[in-house]
C-alpha cells in the first residue's frame, strides 16, 4: 500500500475539494490524479480561461436565430407578398370596360330620336316613300 503525505490547504478549499471528490470519484487520491492528468493531457493551465461557456454560446445563438427570423419576415413582407400579388393580378382576367364611342357633334344630333314622355304610348308613322315621289 502506498504511503500518505499531508498537504496543507485552507479549510474552505479543502471542503470544496472533498465535495467535488465525493461527487465524481471514489477516493480523494483518484480525484487529484484525474485533475492533474486532465491538465497535463490537454496541455492547459488552470489559470487559463477556456472561452465562452455553454450558456453564453446558447444566448448568442438565440440572438442570431431571432435576427434571422426577423430578416425572413422582412423579406416576406417587402418582397415575397408583393411579388405574389403582382403575379396573381397577371392571371386574373377582367372584362374590359365598355367606353362610349366618341362621335362628332353633327352626327350625334342627326341620330337623336324623339321620345314621348313616360306613360304615353305613341306610334310613329313610317314615312311613305311612294307618295313623295
Image (cartoon, rainbow, N blue to C red):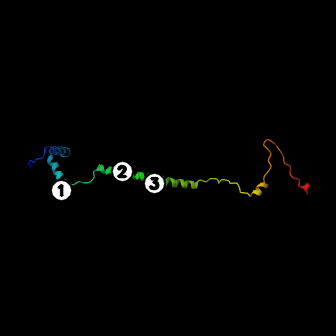
Q: Residue at horizontal 33%, vertical 51%?
A: 60
Residue that carries the numbered disc 3 in the rendered image: 75
The reply to whether callout 2 and callout 1 are in contact (CB within 8 Å) is no
Classify mark 1: helix, strand or loop: helix
Mark 3 neighbour class, 10 Å CA radius: few under 14, some 14 to 19, many 20 or more: few
Classify mark 2: helix, strand or loop: helix
The C terminus, quarter of image? bottom right
Residue that carries the numbered disc 1 in the rendered image: 40
Q: Residue at horizontal 17%, vertical 48%?
A: 31
N-term-proximal mark, 1 vs 3:
1
Residue 23 drawn at (x, y percent): 20, 44
User: Mark 1 or mark 3: which is in front?
Assistant: 3
Q: Residue at horizontal 16%, vertical 51%?
A: 33
Q: Residue furthest top?
A: 119
Label 1 vs label 3: CA separation?
52 Å
Q: Tell me if 29 is positioned left or right of 113 in this view.
A: left
Q: Tell me if 106 is positioned left or right of 128 in this view.
A: left
Residue 62 drawn at (x, y percent): 35, 50
Depth order, front residue of 2/35: 35
Depth order, front residue of 4/61: 61
Amino acid at each position: 500500500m502506498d504511503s500518505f503525505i499531508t498537504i496543507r490547504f485552507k479549510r474552505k478549499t479543502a471542503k470544496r475539494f472533498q465535495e467535488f471528490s465525493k461527487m465524481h470519484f471514489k477516493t480523494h487520491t483518484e480525484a487529484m490524479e484525474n485533475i492533474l492528468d486532465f491538465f497535463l493531457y490537454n496541455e492547459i493551465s488552470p489559470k487559463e480561461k477556456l472561452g465562452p461557456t455553454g450558456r453564453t454560446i446558447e444566448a448568442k445563438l438565440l440572438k442570431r436565430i431571432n435576427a434571422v427570423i426577423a430578416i425572413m419576415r422582412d423579406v416576406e413582407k417587402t418582397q415575397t407578398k408583393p411579388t405574389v400579388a403582382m403575379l396573381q393580378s397577371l392571371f386574373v382576367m377582367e372584362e374590359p370596360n365598355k367606353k362610349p364611342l366618341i362621335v362628332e357633334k353633327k352626327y350625334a344630333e342627326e341620330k337623336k330620336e324623339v321620345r314621348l314622355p313616360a306613360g304615353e304610348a305613341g306610334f310613329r308613322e313610317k314615312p311613305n316613300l311612294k307618295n313623295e315621289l
